[in-house]
Image (spheres, rainbow, N blue to C red):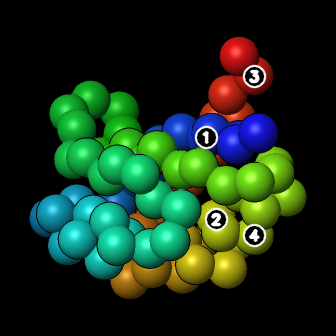
């Protein structure tokens, strides 16, 4: 079974498109969209387990230039 997660992201001013383009091609990223509102970017991730999602967020997404913060939501149904 595949685990899905949504990552809500805030970026530095003017960096949302750049951050989205950097992350869109990572393995496990199924969608990456610039959005309006409280958050700047929303990612949809899919991986084998919640641990795999955590590793993807911690090792490949965090540290992206222009990224300020993330909120990861694991789908439960």
Label pair 4/3, CB-CB below 8 angstroms: no
Q: Is residue 4 above or below residue 11?
A: above
Secondary structure of the residue carrying numbered label 1:
strand
> Is the C terminus in the top left, top right, bottom left or bottom right quadrant?
top right
Between 16 and 45, the residue placed more toward the observer is: 45
Q: Which residue carries the number 4 mark?
A: 55
* Nearer-N-terminus badge (4/1): 1
Q: Residue at x 71, y 41 (%)?
A: 3
Q: Which residue carries the number 3 mark?
A: 76
Q: Which residue carries the number 1 mark?
A: 5
Q: Which residue carries the number 2 mark?
A: 57
* Nearer-N-terminus badge (2/1): 1
x and y percentages locating residue 39 in the rendered image: 36, 40
x and y percentages locating residue 5 in the rendered image: 61, 40
Secondary structure of the residue carrying numbered label 3:
loop
- Can residue 5 be seen in this snapshot? yes
Label pair 1/3, CB-CB below 8 angstroms: no
x and y percentages locating residue 44 in the rendered image: 46, 44
Q: CA distance from mark 2 to mark 3?
A: 18 Å
Q: CA distance from mark 2 to mark 1?
A: 10 Å
Label pair 2/4, CB-CB below 8 angstroms: yes
Q: CA distance from mark 2 to mark 4?
A: 5 Å
* Nearer-N-terminus badge (4/3): 4
Q: CA distance from mark 4 to mark 3?
A: 18 Å
Q: CA distance from mark 4 to mark 1?
A: 12 Å
Label pair 4/1, CB-CB below 8 angstroms: no
* Nearer-N-terminus badge (1/3): 1
Q: Is residue 66 left or right of residue 47?
A: left
Q: Residue at x 75, y 54 (%)?
A: 48
- Can residue 13 be seen in this snapshot? no
Label pair 2/1, CB-CB below 8 angstroms: yes
Secondary structure of the residue carrying numbered label 4:
helix
């Amino acid at each position: 079974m595949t685990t899905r997660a949504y990552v809500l992201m805030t970026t530095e001013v003017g960096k949302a498109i750049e951050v989205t383009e950097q992350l869109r091609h990572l393995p496990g990223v199924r969608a990456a969209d610039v959005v309006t509102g409280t958050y700047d970017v929303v990612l949809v991730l899919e991986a084998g387990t919640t641990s795999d999602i955590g590793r993807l967020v911690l090792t490949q997404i965090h540290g992206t230039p222009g990224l300020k913060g993330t909120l990861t939501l694991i789908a439960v149904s």
